[in-house]
Image: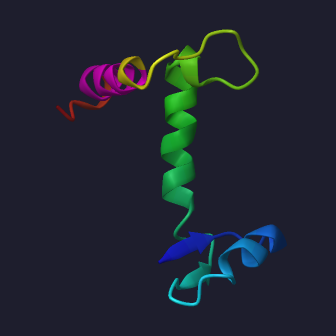
């Protein structure tokens, strides 16, 4: 299952896979976009167009876990 907004480019990509259910709705994408926004706000390595970025996947994951622990008490 894939949920996207109404951008026509998504329909072109997902119509190739007949087994994949593609739902066009904003209600399913708002929460994900909200989390992405929070991550970009608190972690410089996730900002767009910047020189601060993770050079390894491990460091990115550790940074996200640290943020989740410090801000949201998730771990």
Would you say 32 lies left or right of 66 here?
A: right
Which residue in the rendered view is the most extreme toward the left? 75
Can residue 74 be found in the magenta stretch?
no
- Give x and y (percent) for residue 74: 21, 35
- Give x and y (percent) for residue 21: 53, 85
Q: Is residue 43 above or below residue 3?
A: above
Q: Is residue 14 above or below residue 32?
A: below
Quarter placement of the C terminus: top left
- Give x and y (percent) for residue 2: 53, 73
Q: 67 and 56: which one is in front?
A: 56
Q: 30 and 14: which one is in front?
A: 14
Which residue in the rendered view is the most extreme toward the right? 8
Q: Residue at x 54, y 41 (%)?
A: 36
Range of magenta residues: 60-70
Would you say 68 lies left or right of 35 here?
A: left
- Give x and y (percent) for residue 49: 76, 21
The chosen color scheme is rainbow
Would you say 63 lies left or right of 75 here?
A: right
State whether the magenta stretch is mostly helix, strand or loop: helix
Which residue in the rendered view is the most extreme toward the top? 51
Q: Residue at x 56, y 59 (%)?
A: 30
Q: Residue at x 49, y 56 (%)?
A: 31
Q: 50 and 74: which one is in front?
A: 50
Total numbered labels placed on residues in the image: 0
């Amino acid at each position: 299952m894939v949920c996207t907004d109404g951008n026509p480019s998504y329909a072109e990509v997902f119509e190739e896979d007949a087994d994949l259910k593609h739902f066009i709705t904003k209600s399913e994408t708002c929460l994900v976009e909200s989390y992405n926004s929070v991550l970009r706000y608190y972690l410089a390595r996730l900002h767009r167009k910047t020189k601060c970025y993770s050079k390894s996947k491990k460091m990115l994951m550790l940074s996200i876990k640290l943020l989740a622990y410090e801000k949201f008490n998730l771990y």
